[in-house]
Amino acid sequence: MARFLLCSFALILLYPSGIDMYLVGLPRIAVDLSASEAQLHIAFSVYLAGMATSMLIAGRIADKAGRQPVAICGAIVFALASVLCASAINSTMFLVGRFIQGIGAGGCYVVAFAVLRDTLDDRRRAKVLSLLNGITCIIPVLAPVLGNLIMLKFPWQMLFWVMATMGVIVCLLSTLVLKETHPGACATPDAAPASTAESLSSGFFISRVAITTLSVTAILTYVNISPVLLMDVLHFDRGEYSTIMALTALVSMVVAFSTPFALTKFSQRTLMLVAQGLFLVAAVVLVSATTTNVTLMGLTLICAGFSLGFGVTMSQALGPFSQRAGVASSVLGIAQVCGSSLYIWLAAISGVGALNMLIGILISCSMVCILLITFVSAQAGTPDHEKIPDQSRS
């Protein structure tokens, strides 16, 4: 079991590393490639576009050919694209490399969740996904720090050589450590087809796609507007901004690592409702905030709410799928990437202020998700052999 957890973490790790590690070198990259920082900021959207493109097909391939081939190919693509970025001589070549990087990261991201669905039952999966969520919260803090240390001694190209090395390591893990987990990968021609209950159009699955997408949109909106809110509105300097982001990431980690223990005392439904309740309370706090400390408290509640509910909801979303976990992971990933990007883009071109953008998604997310959690039962979407036992009989 340890091998699957290690490989899943490594596969997921490529996604946030590809976003956060290069940001510290952006000013130097812009100078060397004769481009403005504004032009290269699109590299974030290009990367996400590559992920979404990859997810369109990676899940289906993983369900047909198996998890391992997709993981290996995704890691190789990520590594080669990183080399392309490091070798870029103009902004176009750099952006192409970023798009291909996203393709590799997207394939690995889908496989990671599919592997966990294949190897863990519902209760253990919820705990593990919460732990992985907590570990990935470290990346937005550590990646810029690592990038800054690299830039002290080396040119910005070394950032992408490090990413290429990460891709090679993930490829080796996927080849030598990861074992095929897809139940149909070694099936005979007479094997039973996937259950007809594994429907992507079921009300339960759609509700969990909506909840995870809205939750990701809330946290990414916070990350996206945080520089404007904290430095331009609240007048923190860059050092103070970094400290605040590190502290909120620490809160996310603590909550995520505590969630597996909470799952032994409370139902998944309860934790999901509490998570959305924290989003709603955060919105109320931000609306009524009159001091900087109160505003920071509201931002902290956002991080806590996301860390408490995301892993549990993802586990529920994947629960009904045994033969089609790859496709289900793809749908979830595409919805989260595209939904969050669309909201941030529409709010930005509409001229919505940073704080109002954040408050708007928090209120919308919490109200819609509370209704979905209340009226769409987890038991309706969970296979009989994975239904959660009554706590009173534990």
Image (cartoon, grey):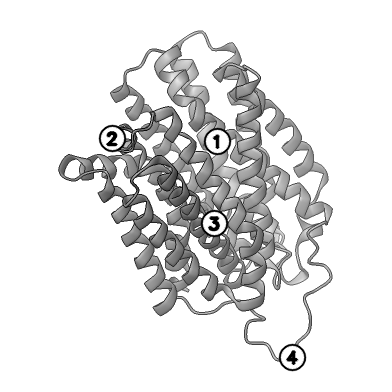
Residue hosting label 3: 106
Q: Nearer the viewer, residue 49 or 392?
A: 49
* Mark-to-mark CA distance, 2 and 4: 56 Å
Q: Earlier in the sequence, mark 2 or mark 4?
A: 2
Residue type for callout 2:
Arg
Question: The disc labelled 3 sits on which kind of residue?
Answer: Gly
Q: Which residue lies under the disc numbered 2?
A: 28
Marks 3 and 4, how far apart at CA: 30 Å
- Residue neighbourhood size for the residue with mark 1, other residues' Cα within 10 Å, grouped as few (<14), some (14–19), many (≥20): many
Q: Position of residue 100 (x, y in %)?
A: 49, 55
Q: Is residue 190 above or below residue 48?
A: below
Tell which of 345 and 308 is nearer to you. 345
Q: Secondary structure at mark 2?
A: helix
Q: Earlier in the sequence, mark 3 or mark 2?
A: 2
Circle 1 sits in a helix, a strand or a loop, which is it?
helix
Q: Which mark is residue 189?
A: 4
